[in-house]
Amino acid sequence: MSPNTKKGTTMTTRLAFGLVVMMSVLVLPAHAGGKTELQQYFSNAADKVKATEDPVAKRAILNESLQSMAKALDIVETSTPISDAEAAGLQRFRNSLQEKQDELAGRNGFAAVPDAQLNAFSQYVVQDMEQADQMVTISIVTLLLIVIILILIL
Amino acid sequence: MLNLQDGSVHANPYRMLWVGVGCATLTVLLCSCSAELPVLREAQQADGGEQATQYSIVCVIHGDGDYLYHDSSGNEYNADEVALAEAQRVALRNPHAEVFIFHQRPRSHFLFFFPLRDGTFYYYRNGRPNAEELYWRDQEQAPFDTEVGLYRRFSAGNQPGKVSLFLYFGHEIPEFDGAGYDASYPDRPLTVQGFARGVGGFRDDSSKFDIVVLSTCFGGTPYTIGALGTAARYIVASPDNLHLSYLDLRSLERMDLGFRDVDVHTFARRYARLAFDILKGQILTTVSVAVYDVDRVQKFLRAFLSVYEYTLNSVKSARQASMAAIEHCDCADLPSVVLPAMSDGVDVFYRPPRFGRAKEKQHHSGWECWRERDPIIGRKPQFDEFKGAVETFYRP
């Protein structure tokens, strides 16, 4: 076998291996459907809140995480064509985020979450999202778009 | 053979690698084309050491979709895998039971093209693993078709006095439409009616399961209980949202002890109480677990179900986006729906969420309905045509 043939074989193998890795990278997140990433996003925020001592900083982390998610929803809704059912799902999701922001700040009939309960509130946000039915009607593509936009705006 | 000069020492391993991949692909293809369900492990089935079983547990775990949750330390869990481990522990700790566990997994492919079996069936008898099989979910014409076939193949039969339980773990089962429930088969709908028929399919003698446990969100709607009542004597369900950590199974371990000197209703109530207590200790969102005595709730259902079904039909005919304008609620929060028989036959364990608008709500009727969303935070109902249906529902 000539050195050129050997090089060609190695390149083909590398190319095949690269394609398999690339397909894995592209296919796996699509299979996860984006919801996992959204749940992870709120879980990470809760971890940061629990690791922070200052109540003002805790509140800021929570508010920012809710606000960024709401912003991502707005961008997706205005920039991509979505079905009526998806629009309804996004609206319900947005409403849920808005309620949490209101409770955090003590607006719209809510008493503000006391400083001593901010860790518990962050956990409540995570658990509420985990059981939330508002994401059921949101398609995988839209969820992935939300995740991508979230990464870009953070 | 190993010619170091021309580099074939490098080429041979690659050739062997590709041959290996080819062989593996062929094997998968051949297995994929098999019409029979392959028994991966079938042991101890005819060793003569089996005893009569007094308890039968059928457990279906829907693991196809997003079932990830986190504990307070941020650790990740897949709800279906946790439920499977719990069900297997129950199976091992019941020497007088036969336990059927069906784990519905996401559809997957070998090398992206060759489909793999996406269901796993476990059969335990007398506290020992008896059989384990992989099966296809793609051929199902109706819910639980394949699972019923496996159940009938292995079941020891329904002897008189045998206590039977059916447990389901999954997302909220839609009352209508139902498309997209199964992430791998989005065109295959699952609705409450189809689900109830599927559960009934496990009972070939038209008898009912003694207890059906519905570990899903919003399992306590009149429509769900009415439909499932055809296949169950008692139903344990969460009328409100249920966190993915699900209803705990610990109290099903050693059912021979659990059933000592108690009837089915008392056992169901104890099970619900313990599941409630465990959820209450871990979860900050709403915790609600109810036990429905199917015979005793008929009076309420007869008075209310036709109105509820009318509402569902109205919702079905409305456009999808009108779903944004409605939400689940406690039926007792709709004053004109409160009927004298509402609490008959329902034991409710309820704790409000620690945060959110519902945190002041101290009681739940055990029945979950639909209502128009409160526009207090700026939401605007989008479809006026839906309003009529909701108002009709308010005034039965």
Image: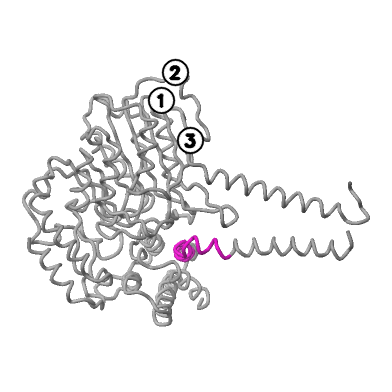
Residue A3: x, y in percent? 89, 63
Res. A78 image quadrant? bottom left
Q: Is residue B391 left or right of residue B232?
A: left
Q: Categorize mark 2 by other alpha carbons within 10 Å: few (<14), some (14-19), many (20+).
A: few
Mark 1 belongs to which amino acid? Asn
Instruction: Tell me what residue is drawn at x 40 percent, y 63 percent.
Output: A122
State the SS at label 1: loop
Residue B268 position (above or below residue B352): above
The chain to which mark 3 is attached is B
Colour scheme used in the picture? one colour
Q: Which numbered disc covers residue B49?
A: 2
- Does residue A105 show up? no
Q: Which numbered disc covers residue B126?
A: 1
Relative depth, front residue between B60 and B254: B60
Relative depth, front residue between A105 and B119: B119
* Distance Cα–Cα, label 2 vs label 3: 19 Å
Is A30 in the magenta?
A: yes
Report the residue that reaches farthest toward the bottom: A78
Residue B61: x, y in percent? 39, 45
Span shown in magenta: A26-46
Name the residue beneath numbered marker 3.
Answer: B132
